[in-house]
Amino acid sequence: MNIDFVKSALLEIDVQNDFCPGGALAVNEGDKVVAPLNKIAGSFKSACAPVIATQDWHPAGHCSFSSSGIPASAGEVLWPDHCVQGTAGADFHKDLDLKPVTLILRKGFRPSIDSYSAFFENDRKTSTGLAGFLKGLGIETVYLGGLATDYCVFFSAMDAIKLGLKVYLLLDAVRGVNYPEGSVEKALNTMKSAGVLAV
Ligand code: VGL
Ligand code: ZN
């Protein structure tokens, strides 16, 4: 891959224990994203280019947990308790190389708003600050990998496109929940139609 590191950033989405085999919201082969991400992150590190790792970071009783008893809004999915702040499940996968990571961005910490995207929370208005961070660095292109293809990666990619960024999706470095059935394929098709370049 020929990357122009001057205006590029790497986004590593939610590579956390709870999304990996054995975790509370395990994604099939979720741990398989680690090696390809480490490899590309190494190239970003050599170029001193920004690598952002996001961390799903929910307080106990978060509104996205079915255990909270808070009813889902229309079209929303409820989840088992996962990525609870300070728990082992919320930690990054032990093999994810954090040395290249220049920013750890936590999201989903507001008790009553979930946040799939690295850019905007699920109310689609509350900013995480990432757009401003990237703008401040003059970033025009983002490379995207991590978990899960059909949720946090998907919403991050779509927001990045809306923000006018060029988006490369690292196909070997993403895995999906595929719940409901078919959601990975749907997400991939929607991303491609929006201009996301799968590489
Ligand atoms: C995610 C469901 C709930 C993700 C986070 O990282 O894709 N999915 N929270
Ligand atoms: Zn979550």
Image (cartoon, rainbow, N blue to C red):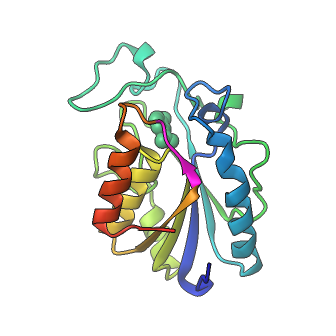
Is 80 above or below relative to 157? Answer: above
Depth check, front residue: 184 or 108:
184
List x then y, in percent, for residue 12: 59, 56
Residue at (50%, 79%) from the top-left corner? 139
Would you identify the image quadrant in which residue 112 lies? Answer: top left
Q: Which secondary structure type mostly characterizes the magenta part of the structure? A: strand
x%, y% of residue 154?
40, 52
**Is residue 3 within the magenta segment?**
no
Q: How many numbered tags mark residues here?
A: 0
Classify the position of the N terminus by image quarter. bottom right
Which residues make up the magenta segment? 173-177
Q: Is residue 112 above or below residue 67?
A: below
Q: Position of residue 37 (x, y in %)?
A: 67, 59
Which residue: 70% across, 62% down?
A: 101
79, above or below 11, in the image:
above
> Residue 70 or 186: which is nearer the viewer?
186
Q: Residue at x 79, y 61 (%)?
A: 99
Q: Is residue 53 above or below residue 64?
A: below
Residue 174 in the magenta stretch? The answer is: yes
